[in-house]
Image: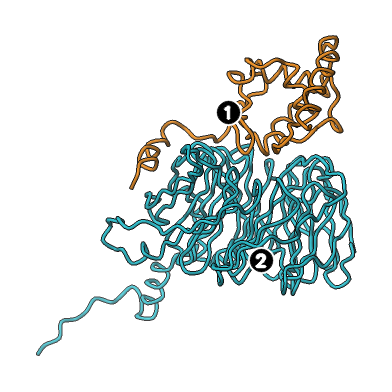
Chain colours: A cyan, B orange
Amino acid sequence: MQRLPLPTPLLSLPQLFLLLALLSTNVNARGTGDLGIVIERATGSVQVIETSNNTTLGRIEGLGDLSHASAVYSRDGQYAYVFGREGGLTKIDILNKKLVKRIIQSGNSIGGAISQDGRLVAVSNYKPGGVKIFDADTLTLVADIPASYGNDGLLSKVIGLVDAPGQKFVFSLWDAGEIWIADLSNLKTDNTGGNTSKPRITKFKGIGKNPYDALITPDGRHYIVGLFGEDGMALLDLWNLDAGVKRILDGYGKGEKKLPVFKMPHLEGWAIAGNFAFMPAIGRHEVLVVNTLDWTEAGRIKVHGQPIFVMARPDGRHIWVNFAVPNNDTLQIIDTQSLKIIKTLTPGKGVLHMEFEPRGEEIWVSIRDEDRLAVFDTETFKQLITFDAKKPSGIFLTSRAHRIGL
Amino acid sequence: MKKALFIINLLVMQLFIQSAIAEVDTTRQNELRYFVKHDCGSCHGMTLKGGLGPALLPERLSAMPKSFLVSTILEGRPNTAMPAWKSMLTVDEASWIAEQLQHGQLLYKSQHGFIQPSQLAETNKAMSKP
């Protein structure tokens, strides 16, 4: 057979392969493990940040009323779900820095959580009081759980919503003083699109007056809710539901005059270090130390003001604490071995939130009234860099995607 | 008992407030505007449409006596999450805030990224039952 003469190729074969490889590779491809977002509360925007070199990558706008906002992440760290004050639920793509989808799912909401399998996003609402659960992919509603209590059809504001192992969400009812567990494992396998099955709800009543926020321990076993109306906290062991809700730290403020509470403290899973849990004492200038082996008080630490966030560095060696107005220009660092304050920083007015980098060598701090973010070295306590941000509040890094309760 | 004290407080306050004209200089007014938006806003919402605390919109507040609002700001409300702000605010300042709130003067001006009507298309879908 006679071979036809081939035209001289413009590119050699290896060159051709290289070209194809280049064409098929997204030159912008990068991982998401070092990314995060910062809520800009007054402008309805978020800044995308990265912690490998501590830079800001851009801004996503149009997220609505973020005056009290929080966020959770998809497992791949590409999407953040931002819960806004006005009932807004916004899914953003932080790699491509764009808004994917936005819905208004209630009149007033406080926070949210993502399920164990990453397929459901739950939002806790003040108005109408309850929890709504959405498909994480499409944000279509898959379950509605009104927080009705008593006999008059009243709806309670819902707080302290967290995810728990077994495809569960746990949350508390501010007005009713109840803890509810919603088990969504029956929705998990329903691929018919019908979702006719309802979440199974387990209720614990009379847990105490006005639960204001809650945390779940990093192992997903203990759900602890702070009580605004009482000196004490309620503890639910999710491994032993039959034991019911137990009161811990009962009467921690007995005999002392309660101060006006200028801002509700937050509880977060990150306040657990070794065998100690560190909790803000409500209405006091104290951080409470709890022994997690038997949940008894192990001590209390006098601090600069009313603690808001009490967060353990990922290695558990230090606790960083910020404060309510009028002491919100200060951060204090507690050593978890000596239970003593080892450093007091004054980063600036309006220190609203802080977030440790995944392994804890640096911490990001939002300084609202100065319109900036600052990154500190957690060993030297020196400020490393500062960025402009518009009224920054919550900082959320993608490492949260892989932690129970965050 | 707490309630009785609260009412007595209210009456005493009323005497003060009726004689006081809320005089606050402009620098302080700006601080107070910021304070209401961001610090009251933690519970009442930055848009004052409510959160853990109730809405502070004029349609609700204008129906209430000013003295009640001033005493609520300064003394707090027993058995609720509303604290007493008197360590941070004077009677004049609380009175100025109450007046501004009643007349809707502290409402958040939406010049930024708040939700646009065009984005609300999904709302009804999300609000409806599955």
| Tags 2 and 1 on a common chain | no
Of the pair A221 and A162, the residue shown nearer to us? A221
Q: Residues within 10 Å of mark 2 (few under 14, many from 20)?
A: few
Of the pair B50 and A200, the residue shown nearer to us? A200
- Residue drawn at the location 80% of the way across and 39% of the way down: A260
| The C terminus of chain A, quarter of image | bottom right
Chain holding disc 2: A
Tag 2 residue: A52
Chain holding disc 1: B
Task: Say which element carries label 1.
Answer: loop
Q: Residues within 10 Å of mark 1 (few under 14, many from 20)?
A: few
- Residue drawn at the location 73% of the way across and 47% of the way down: A352
Horizontally, is B91 left or right of A143 in the view?
Answer: right
Amino acid type, mark 2: Ser
Task: Say which element carries label 2.
Answer: loop
Q: Is residue A226 visible?
A: yes
Horizontally, is A197 left or right of A66 in the view?
Answer: left
Task: Check the image and report above or below for A214 versus A66.
Answer: below
Q: How many marks?
A: 2
Quarter of the figure with residue B105: top right
Q: Is residue A71 visible?
A: no
Tag 1 residue: B110
Measured as percent of width and height from the top left, residue A342 is found at 90, 64
